[in-house]
Amino acid sequence: MSDAPLRLRLDGKALTQNWQALDRMSGTAMCGAAVKADGYGLGARAVTERLIAAGCRDFYVATWAEAAEIGELCSNMSLTVFHGVRREDMAVALESAARPCLNSAEQVARWREAAGGPCDVMVDTGMNRLGVSTQEVRDGLLDGLRIDTLMSHLACADEPDNAMNERQRAALAALSEATDAARISLANSAGIALGKGYHLDLARPGLSLYGGVQVDALASHIKQVALPEAQVIQRRRIEAGDCVGYNATFTAERAMELAILNIGYADGYLRGFSGTGIARFGDAECPVIGRVSMDLIAVSVDAAPEIGEGDWLAIDYDLPAAAAQSGLSQYELLTGLGRRYQRVWNE
């Protein structure tokens, strides 16, 4: 893909500095890394290699296919599959060095009956997504399992004043003597910022590793990692009264210079950026004009008259700012980045 008209510049130093900052904020707790969804869209292998070099030793993926992709990189590390074990997963899981995170009584029974090895367990403390109930744990559901990490997941960590955070923390902490788990884990990226009471034995950051900032307490610690760049396919001039893009949502009030860029919603640059997104050519700001289409956007280049076919423009993609511009979540902005980008790491 050396000639791709779309590239993603990735800052390896920012990635590792983000993990180091989250590690420091986690205090005495270990700090792992969620690298699911192909490293939140940036490339799981490249992300994992850099985080291992930075000192991370605990990694989390969603599926066994994701575990296989980075398995040999994590041969001396801790690797957990969040979604546990379906019947279809058992043959692979029993041979894998990765651990399942068991999420239901059915999964617990399946793992026990197969004489599976060490595992993690997810406890539902109020999110009502995945996890066994706190009552099931008290009733002995997990007795006899070799549990590395007993974990739960915060539903409202990005709302520091939400009372649900403390209810979930207390519910998990109350189980600390109910199993023989070696570690207890609750905090995600925003959960780390909630303070020492949430750090427990192990934190599991995800989004903030990649530049996401969900709460003000993280803002000074987290650096941008991903910057899309798109090439100009065509330069054109429009006159007053001309329309641009699907459904003619933009009508020029004056003559304007446009550049058509090779990026669109098929690349994860979604329609929420229509009329709100910004591209840059050096110091020149080039706003998105009209509606984002599948493979193309139009930007005004009045501020950069020298732009021509073949030039590259950087797309504003600071995650908190881009989320505000587009109405999309920071998670969507990252994980939606498509395969057509040439991914270029700076180190």
Image (cartoon, rainbow, N blue to C red):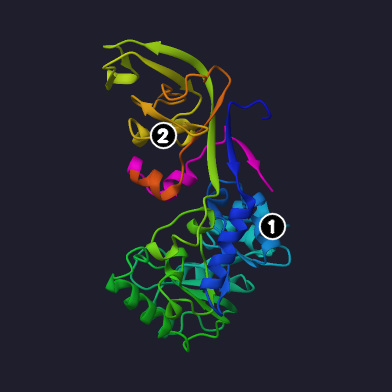
Q: Quadrant of the N terminus?
A: top right
Q: Earlier in the sequence, mark 1 or mark 2?
A: 1
Is residue 340 on the magenta stretch?
Answer: yes
Q: Residue furthest bottom?
A: 177
Q: Bounds of the magenta span?
A: 325-347
Tell me the SS state at disc 2.
strand
Local packing at callout 1 (Cα closer than 10 Å; few below 14, some 14-19, many 20+) is: some
> Mark 1 or mark 2, which is nearer to you?
2
Residue type at the position of mark 1: Gly
Local packing at callout 2 (Cα closer than 10 Å; few below 14, some 14-19, many 20+) is: many
> Gap in Å between the C-alphas at discs 1 and 2?
39 Å
Residue at the spot 49% in from the left edge and 79% down from the top edge: 200
Q: Which mark is residue 22?
A: none
- Which residue does the numbered mark 2 point to in the structure image? 278
Hey, which quadrant is residue 136 in on the image?
bottom left
Residue 91, how many percent across, how many down?
64, 59
